[in-house]
Amino acid sequence: MKNPLENRPRLYREQLLTVEDMEQFKFELLEAMKKLLKSNGTPPPKKWLKTDEVRKILGISAGKLLNLRINGTLPYTKIGGVIYYDQDDIQQMFSSRKFQHP
């Protein structure tokens, strides 16, 4: 297997690094960072939220959230004793209860 460093030009300690070299390096580094940020970006929002997360988002008590579940206002999924809420269901709950004043 060939060493990738063998293809690089040999550097000697007498060589100087120019301002132009540094500017080129800065440009290449910034471009690489921009690509990384675009590809990773911010993580997508979670599709499923747990009870505590929903309570914090809505600013409601555990009892109020229980009432929303019981009366069917907010659908949920229960897996192994943990209750999950779909983000889309929360948005739909708000959209379906919009009031417009005349």
Image (cartoon, grey):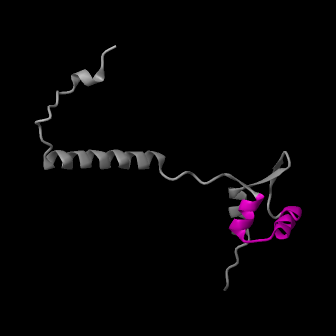
Q: In screen coordinates, is 84 left or right of 30?
A: right
Q: Is residue 45 left or right of residue 74?
A: left
**Residue drawn where x is 79% and y is 62% of the image:** 74
Residue 2 is covered by the magenta coloring: no
Residue 58 belongs to magenta span:
yes
Residue 85: give x, y in percent of width and height: 75, 56
Give the magenta part as a residue range.
Answer: 51-72
Determine whether, in the image, residue 5 is placed left or right of residue 16. Answer: right
**Residue 96 % position (x, y):** 73, 68
Residue 1 point in image, percent of width and height: 34, 13
Residue at the far right in the pictured view: 70
- Name the magenta segment's main secondary structure: helix
Left or right? Give the position of 99 relative to 77.
left
Q: In this rendered view, identify the residue nearer to me: 79 or 101.
A: 79
Question: Which residue is more in the foreground, 102 or 60?
Answer: 60
Which quadrant of the rendered structure holds the C terminus? bottom right
Rendered residue at 81%/64% (across/down): 73
Compared with residue 69, is residue 22 higher up or lower down, i.e. above or below? above
How far from the left and from the top, in percent, is residue 43? 55, 51
Query: In terms of depth relative to the viewer, which is nearer, 96 or 57?
Result: 57
**Hey, which residue is sitting farthest front in the picture?**
13
